[in-house]
Image (spheres, rainbow, N blue to C red):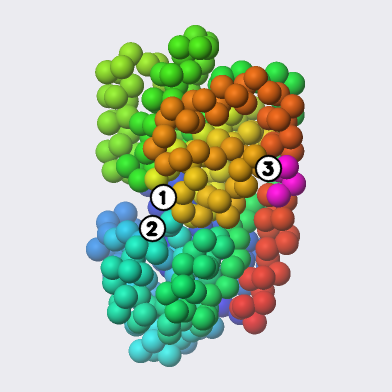
Amino acid sequence: MKLLYLGNQLSKHGFNKTTIETLGLHLEQEGFGVYYASNKKSFPLRMLDMMRSVIIYRKQVSYILIDTYSTKAFWYAFVCSQLARVLNIKYIPILHGGNLPNRLKNNPKLCRMVFANAHKNVAPSGYLKQAFENAGFTNVIHIPNSIEIDKYELKTRVELAPKLLWVRAFASIYNPEMAVKVLQQLLEKHPSASLTMVGPDKDGSLKTTKDFADSIGVAVNFTGQLAKEDWWQLASEHDIFINTTHFDNTPISVMEAMALGLPVVSTNVGGIPYLLTDKENALLVNDDDDKEMTETILDLLNDKVKANQLAKNARTFIEQMDWQVVKNEWKQILR
């Protein structure tokens, strides 16, 4: 069976790999033929390339997979889904971004044109599945983001130090300045505390965060974008993973931190509580509450038994999202 996969295939331009570059490869390894669009850096050229691919491959593919976001990339999904409808090709939006429920509220007619006519809508989190069902969509299924668990070496931490790791694209929606505020407060109790922030700039937030850190006299290790293998190695040198986002779905970086055995402290927003259970496999705090996150980290530093139990539970939970498990759900809908 042949598929056309539409999404932001932009890692060669210095951006993080997105689902099109991970799920697509997995599907190829399972025997599917996969065409891709697009790796064009320019938004208009990417749109044109996607439309062109839909037309070119219309008679060769059984399904079109469309990475669907709440931001301006939503328009890829809208235009290409409607083109697929005209050409009578089955399409499957893969729902990304914790802010998609707001798109459903703000553009209900356009969303109904996209999602109601889809073969299936794939929600990687229970949060988005519920949001879409609450909006009246009945063709939504939950298939979690997957990882290859065997690639992640679990580290059990005998000692716990205030060495924080943050991994995300620098964008205001992910609230990177909160991480710097947390470090500033930790330094008052632990002068050796450190923070490493990994990820490319998305909207100018990298410079803003660097400037903020400089303005309050806090030293942060900004690495820029790293290959997965490089930040996995870096993870072994850190003891706590923090996630400071305002909105979220099921972030791969958090899943990977869980697989690596890093205790996770995260804001409790969007799809996060569908992935993380407070005091069971992570610790959750209120959105944008740097003081609460700091206090939570301080408590964790004083309870190594709790930290190791959280990490152990997180690894057990994330093993359910191994590709060897999840692939069967994809095969089911692509029959």
Image quarter of the N terminus: bottom right
User: First in sequence: mark 2 or mark 3?
Assistant: 2
- The secondary element bearing badge 3 is classed as loop
Which residue was labeled with disc 2? 99
Q: Nearer the viewer, residue 194 or 200?
A: 194
Image quarter of the C terminus: bottom right
Which residue was labeled with disc 3? 280
Within 10 Å of disc 2 (Cα), the crowding (few <14, some 14-19, many 20+) is some
Q: Is residue 252 magenta?
A: no
Q: Which mark is residue 247?
A: 1
Q: Residue furthest top?
A: 191
Residue type at tag 2 = Asn
- The secondary element bearing badge 2 is classed as loop
Gap in angstroms between the C-alphas marked 2 and 3: 26 Å
Q: Residue at x 33, y 69 (%)?
A: 105
Q: Residue at x 35, y 75 (%)?
A: 111
User: First in sequence: mark 1 or mark 3?
Assistant: 1
Q: Nearer the viewer, residue 163 or 132?
A: 132
- The secondary element bearing badge 1 is classed as loop
Q: Which residues are magenta?
A: 313-317
Q: Residue furthest left?
A: 44
Q: From the top left corner, tell me how far across and down residue 88 is, in percent.
A: 43, 90
Q: Residue at x 39, y 37 (%)?
A: 288
Main secondary structure along the magenta-highlighted residues: helix
Can residue 99 be seen here? The reply is: yes
Residue type at tag 1 = Phe
Q: From the top left corner, tell me how far across and down residue 215 is, in percent.
A: 27, 18
Q: Are marks 2 and 3 in contact (CB under 8 Å)?
A: no
Q: Are marks 1 and 2 in contact (CB under 8 Å)?
A: yes
